[in-house]
Image (cartoon, rainbow, N blue to C red):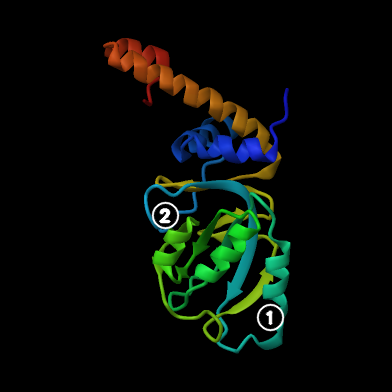
Amino acid sequence: MEIATLEDLCKGFQQTYVAAITDILDFQFDLHDQWLGPEIRPLVPEMRVAGPAFTLRWVNDRSPGGERLGRLSAGIIDSLRPCMVVVADTSKNRNAGYWGELMCNLSLERGVTGAVIDGGVRDPYYIWKAGFNMFCPFTCPNEADTRSRLDSFQEPIAINNVQVRPGDFIIADFGGAVVVPQEIVQDVYRRVQELVAKESNFRKMIRDGISGDEAVRVFGKSI
């Protein structure tokens, strides 16, 4: 079986849709809880992203980050690579903005086109203008430092009880955000391409006037 390149995976997954991916995870891999939850939404409906996770973890601690925060921030910036998707666990803090326009521009320069932040983000208009694909529950103008403490990066995190490890694949669009474990990403990619092709053919059959019985026979009971 041909192995898809990272660029092929990113482009191919972005051209599919999250519901098709969750169908594959549900029915072919017995993975039923890979959706990151209803709060994670794009700033605008057109945004979509796919790529390996670059994880951040913030904890609720109001102490100033000081030099340690500077070292971690520098390490994060220097560790970003093309195609990555930044994924941040904010410990559900609702009074801080964890990613803003300047970090989006730094990310874009390094080939990172999107982020999933389980918390507030700053500068939403300028993020949109920059062409950065941002997924989050809400916007917040407050600086994160002194409201949160950056604890780690590129370590396993959890968002709404869904584990995200560095390198797990993140796919997000207007339908939500989902995590595909890195061990099965090639197989999921191949199968989702097959499913999307099948559904495209089914749409043509609908336009051609397929009957209810035939629809169930071709596509199954859950259409």
Quadrant in the rendering for residue 86: bottom right
Query: Where does the image place residue 189, in percent across and percent down from the top left?
Result: 60, 32
Q: Which amino acid, by three-letter code, is at mark 2?
A: Pro
Report, in whole angstroms, how far the alpha carbon at label 2 lies from the one at label 1: 29 Å
Examine the rendering and report whether any part of residue 94 can be seen.
Answer: yes
- Label 1 neighbour load within 10 Å: few <14, some 14-19, many 20+: few
Query: Where does the image place residue 207, in percent across and percent down from the top left?
Result: 29, 16
Residue closest to the eye, 134 or 130 = 130
Examine the rendering and report whether any part of residue 90 can be seen.
Answer: no
Residue 42: mark = 2
Of callouts 2 and 1, which one flags the residue occurring earlier in the amino acid sequence?
2
Quadrant in the rendering for residue 188: top right
Determine the residue positioned at 67% across, 55% down.
165
Query: Where does the image place residue 199, in percent across and percent down from the top left?
Result: 43, 23
Q: Is residue 172 above or below residue 26?
A: below
Q: Is residue 213 left or right of residue 169?
A: left
Q: Secondary structure at mark 2?
A: strand
Q: Quadrant of the C terminus?
A: top left
Q: Quadrant of the N terminus?
A: top right
Residue closest to the eye, 76 or 106 = 106
Q: Is residue 18 left or right of residue 7?
A: left
Q: Secondary structure at mark 1?
A: helix
Residue bearing mark 1:
70
Q: Are marks 2 and 1 in contact (CB under 8 Å)?
A: no
Determine the residue positioned at 56% across, 40% down.
31
Q: Which amino acid, by three-letter code, is at mark 1?
A: Gly
